[in-house]
Image: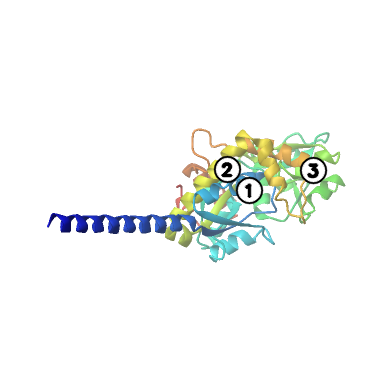
Amino acid sequence: MKKSLLIIATLMLLLLSACGKESTEKTSNEKGKLQKVSLMLDWYPNAVHSFLFVAEEKGYFKDQGLDVDIQMPADTNDPLKLVAANQIDMAMSYQPQVLVARGEDIPVQSFAAIVRHPLNQLMVPTDGPVKSPKDLQGKTIGYPSIPLDEAIVKTMVKADGGDAEKIKMVDVGWDLIPSMAMKKNDALIGGYINHEKLLLDKEGHPMRTLNPADYGVPDYYELVMVASEKGLKEKPEVFKKFMAAMTKGQKYVQEHPEDGLSVLMNHEDKTSPLEKDVETKSLEILLPLMDAKEKSFGYQDPQTWDKTAQWLKANKVIKENIKAEDAFVNF
């Protein structure tokens, strides 16, 4: 009897051991299978994207169980459109653009603030007569025919005590740098302080920048991470994992900017080659503007969204009243 019980006990232990091994192998296999996620950049790879390529190269996405496919848009309007259509899981876009989209009933939301302050700033020649926005009266401002840029300039001129009706906005398309280099206009809006300004300076056309946030424009988030409402609702765990990985990537870039930039340079697009000196200066400008201070990387302040939405409505960039709190989520 005792022998029979011993045999039965031994068989039970072997069975439990086998089940445990099978369960462990199954869990291991599940952990080893990465979930594919598509991400579209706002533009071609440049300094602001360093944290993403670091997260990819250092295995931070993989550690979170994600296989992230980083794509470049054919057109700057593509990321938001493709996210809204659920053809892309997530994308980089712009805070004002997200609010404009929601005003048109396009169900997209931001889930992280990447660059926390305006990069699109008014630029004037350093040795020119324009010292502040009110000096633009009677002057021409080149811009890429975007309503947001018109609203920014007019707000700045009014806030500085000037007459916004006495300025002339000139559509230069995306020939922003030539329009200033050839002195076709007195000022420029639509260019970034970490790109166009640096290139103009390098080409011998030093520019002074005037920050919209100093002249009546909300201190809005320039770049944000966006997804569709449907995607955020159905797969919140994916976005939380993505946030954890990209936060680690940004931390690495902050602590090792040279290495972070080297990783970026390895991922430059052949059709848009990068200049290392320009991207080095760009990253130096960007890192402080991406810092959320005591908050976690990517945190979004409800007041920033509310103020930006109100300003866009007041300046007729968006026509409908929208709930700013519905335009973003914090994880």
Q: Can residue 309 be seen in this view?
A: no
Q: Name the residue under label 1.
A: 53
Q: Name the residue under label 2.
A: 249
Identify residue type, mark 3.
Leu
- Sequence-first tag of 3 and 1: 1
Residue at 57% over, 62% down: 88
Residue at 45% over, 50% down: 325
Q: Is residue 266 visible?
A: yes
The residue sitting at the left extreme is 1
Front in this rendered view, residue 178 or 297: 297
Q: Mark 3 points at which residue?
A: 199
Identify residue type, mark 1.
Phe
Q: Distance from label 2 to label 1 (Cα)? A: 8 Å
Q: Are marks 2 and 1 in contact (CB under 8 Å)?
A: yes
- Sequence-first tag of 2 and 1: 1
Q: Distance from label 3 to label 1 (Cα)? A: 23 Å
Identify residue type, mark 2.
Gly
Q: Distance from label 3 to label 2 (Cα)? A: 27 Å
Side (left or right) of 153 relative to 248:
right
Q: Where is residue 203 in the image (x, y as percent from the top left)?
A: 85, 41
